[in-house]
Amino acid sequence: MLVVSYDISDNKLRAKFAKTLIKQGGIRLQYSVFEVNNSKRVLDNLIVRIENYYSKKFGGGDSVFIFETDMHKALKYGNAIHRDQDLLFFT
């Protein structure tokens, strides 16, 4: 399972990102937190979409975190890449 959390300031871009997650099978857990069933294809599609479209439109404080809960790994985009501290999350 993937847990995707985002903070995107632009309303239209934020809504479009949420729709992208829903199209990938995402289920909203909180307003800006989704659970997505993990497969290599889903993760690859999401990464390509973020890197090729969304990250180019991010403002300075925008960020996306992707937590791969089965691998205990986190991918970070936007402002999130500047946070160097270790992440601790429980599964």
Image (spheres, helix red, strand yellow):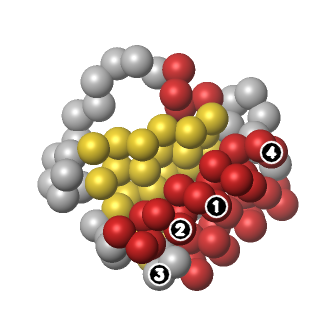
Task: Identify the residue at image location x=66%, y=74%.
Answer: 19
Q: Residue 25: where, in percent of width, then height?
A: 47, 81
What residue sits right under mark 1 in the picture? 49
What residue sits right under mark 4 in the picture? 57
Q: Residue 78: where, in percent of width, then height?
A: 63, 35
Question: Which element is circle 1 on?
Answer: helix
Residue 33 appears in the figure = no
CA gap between label 3 and label 4 equals 23 Å
* Amino acid type of the residue tagged 3 in the rendering: Gly
Q: Is residue 6 above or below residue 70?
A: above
Q: Mark 4 or mark 2, which is nearer the start of the sequence?
A: 2
Task: Identify the residue at image location x=53%, y=56%.
Answer: 47
Question: Which element is circle 4 on?
Answer: helix
- Disc 2 + disc 1, Cβ < 8 Å: yes
Question: Which element is circle 2 on?
Answer: helix
* Amino acid type of the residue tagged 2 in the rendering: Asn
Question: Which label sits in the foreground, 3 or 1?
Answer: 1
Question: Which element is circle 3 on?
Answer: loop
CA gap between label 2 and label 3 equals 12 Å
> How busy is the neighbourhood of tag 4: few (under 14 within 10 Å), some, or many (20 plus)?
some
Task: Identify the residue at image location x=37%, y=58%.
Answer: 3
Question: Which label sits in the foreground, 2 or 4?
Answer: 2
